[in-house]
Image (cartoon, rainbow, N blue to C red):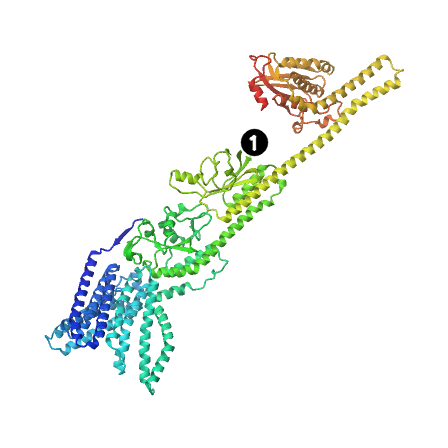
Amino acid sequence: MSRTTRSFPRVGRLAAILVLALAYVVLLGGDAWVFFPRSASHLTYLPYAFLQFGVSALAALLFLAVGALVWLYAYRRGVALLLLCFCACMMMTFLVQTGAAVGDMLLSVIGGVSSALSLLLFTTLLLLFPQNMLAPPPLVAASTRACCSFGHLLRLLVLSLLAPAYLGLVVLLSLLVTCHLAFYDWGTSPRLAWLNFVDYTYYLLTLTGILTSIAHLYRRTATLREQQQRRLFMGAVILAFAPFLLLNVLPWWLHIPLRVDPRFSTLPLALLPPLLGYSILRYQILVLDRYIRRVVAWIVGLVCLVMLAYIVAALCLILPLPDLPARTLLTVALMAVLAPLTWWLAGILTERLFFSEMYHYRRVLEAPHPLESEGATLDEVAQLLSAAAMNVFETREVCLFVLDDESGYYRLCPPLSYAEPADEVRLRLLRWLLPMEPEEALSEEGWLTLTPSLIERLMPARSPLHLSELQHSLGSSPAGLARYLQVAVTRQELDPLLVPVRAQGRLIAVLVLGERGDHQPYAGPDFEAIELMLARFTPLLETARLSARASRHAAMLHALYSVNALPMSAIETIEDVAVNYAEVAARAGSAGAEVWLYDEQEACLRRVAYLPGGPPLSAAQQLSSLQEADWRPWFYEGYELAPGPARDHALSSHIPPCLPQTPPFPFAWLPLKRAHRYLGVLVLTYARAHVFSCEEKHMLEMFSSQCATMLENAKITLELRAAYEQQKELDRLKDQFIMTASHELRTPLTAVLGYIELLKEYHMHLSPEVRDDFIARAHRGCDELVLLVSNIMDASRVHMDAERLKLETVELRKSVEHVVDILDALSKRERHTLRIHVPAGIYVLADELRLRQILLNLLSNALKYSPPGTDVDIFCRVEERWVTISVRDYGLGVPREAQKHLFERFVRLDRDMNSPVRGAGLGLYISEQLVKAMGGKIWVESSGVPGEGSTFSFTLQHVPTSLPRCETPHSVRRELAR
């Protein structure tokens, strides 16, 4: 964006002003030198002479001041030069007025020539300002020319030739008049009749031209500003000449005896220069426009009251009243009635005639709109304010940035829609405001934030500022008249106006206005129109903004407390509660959510839930070195400070001490605790800037308290549920034990009782061999009962036995051979072959007695549940640290769905419940407990297909042969202790 700022050179202008000031002093001294000696002879009129001289000098000084001000600061240099020359002529006219009145020839010549030239300059000024009537007419395009009639084209041509011809004629007549006045006042030539005719023609032609140009240009004025400047010209002429015409010319023409001294009736001519200067500089004045209008209204009111007093006094003189008191009483009564009405009408006349621009602004802004209601949304009010700015300034380049309390940034409102053709104009304006293209600055949420540096510079501003002013350094504040007047012209493609919108002293929005429809710069009247517009729409905007914030808070509250609807039956772990609350918090706050649960054993926080939507708080999965300060709420909004100790201290004092580093984004740290019991921390992270309001902090703290209560209740509920499930499992095991014991114990007991009763009844009739067989069968039944009872007792004390294990180095093959010897009789009776595939020299770390018990249980099951005549294999596989011992049979196998319950207590397959094979369902359970106690694990592998059988395997710690047999490795003991 290229900008070049041009300031007008001041040296030449100051030199011209110094010359005029010197002329003012010289003429004032010369006039006093001539006037006071000739007035001193009449001592009675001396005070009046001083008053007359002072008024003339003051009027001349006023013309000089106005001309100098316009000459110094006006943009249009040709207009400023003409007004300076006009003010110089009027200054000289007033300066020599008193000296010429006492008959000084030189002063009379100066006064006559300057007054004649002032009319010429004023006429030329009207032809150039506010619209240049001497400029050639613009070229008409062929398409437009075809639509225009011949009469219209002829009228344009005549008007374009008439103004220069008129000005040339007036210049010629002014030369003749000035020469005539100069020679006649010096007495060098007699007064000729045709020269008198030239004088009258000149004055009549100039006055007629002034009135005609005012009326014609008022009709031709296209823009509101040109109309306003033309009205100010008209007002200046009316205020300057109306008192003289009404108080002197009209009484002379109507032969009214009551007349006013022309030296007093011409005093309002002093109002002409300030009003002319104001009309030229009006749109360079940044402030004070309202006060200037008040002063003009008072002046108009005073002039109207003076003329009213004269009209009332003249009317009372004309009316046939009996005496002077009656005339006086009537005059006072009429003035008492008409004066307030005249003052009120003068104010309306000033606004409607002189300042119609402000009247137009008020009428546009006071138009009703259907969206002006309490239920209007923020986007609707923003659209309404933008539309009002477009109507007032006739521009389409309007953007409104509204403060978002959550982020602290100002976002475009209504949002930018690239599909709308009307937003192309706003895009052009935005490219001047943003450091990047609007498409790149558009965030994921559709927000377009205003540059923070512009906001910082606009914050202390008391009035609207142009973008070029904001981009200057903050230390360069304007001085002198530059605070109230634009003294330089900024030439750039676009210089938007940034308007601060405040409510209760807070900057709630920034209104950005592009170029006006008439391509003119913004000035004081526009600033007042902006004030009127903001006075009407700022309350609506603030109400809509607060309503939107309240709606967001209500929605957030609803979302936060909707978690109460979660059923406790759906929660199975503490992590489920954490995930549920993290989801609710992330959805309600439009942020990322994390839950860190407190591990009491290691005194650290572990992350158990993370919901995206914001960056993760830390790359680590746990936070340690917790302090008391970590268990209070923290709301970190981010701090942009220069690197150094101050920044480090500021950052460290606004984050929890347990964090290893300061996150580069805002976050909320919400501890979850009940009384003095620490449960964890809920964290909300934000991907963009975020400002925590007091209401939001309070809501989040309430939500964290609710989350902590829910976590504690869930923990108690899960503990009760676990205890209940454990009790149910105990009841199930008890019932299964009773069922199994009643079934398994009844069969051998029945056999024992049956043989005992047979022996009792038929003892005398049985042979010794049969009696011995019955006794042996009864004895086997008792042995089976003893084995079942022993298994039940082993199952009850297996935990205590596992704690008293004596781990030592055991040779595996010897233990296997010992158990095979025990089962040799049983295997031969059922025609089974026990095949050992365990090499000698393999040592394991185990309790030898318990190892044999495990092997005995596995081999007994393999023999019992295998068809007669099948083999049973015992083999092992040695790895680096472990030895896997396996027992394989070729029986019916174990169904896959039953394998996971096979190592539980009192579990038997349904097919075996009514089989002749006895068992309590405790052997595999006891084996699993013993294997686990020795540091290994046990499992089953079976396809469930009959004939393929099953393979039961368990692992034990391998002891290398290099170690002594009775030595237990330290690594093994460490592993078992863990």
Residue 757 spot, x, y in % from top left? 86, 20
Note whether residue 165 is visible.
no
Q: Quadrant of residue 906?
A: top right
Residue 524 in sight here? yes
Pinpoint residue 920: horizontal percent, then vertical percent: 73, 24
Tell me: 443 left or right of 319. right
Q: Mark 1 points at which residue?
A: 601
The three-letter code of the residue at mark 1 reads Gln
Element marked by disc 1? loop
Q: Name the residue located 70 percent from the left edge and 31 percent from the top edge.
A: 730
Q: In this view, does 639 lie above or below 164?
A: above
Q: Circle 1: is it few (<14), some (14-19), or many (20+) Cα within 10 Å?
A: few
Quadrant where the image shows the C terminus: top right
Residue 642 image-quadrant placement: top left
Choose between 410 and 343: the one closer to the eye: 343
Say if 619 sits above or below 239 in the image: above
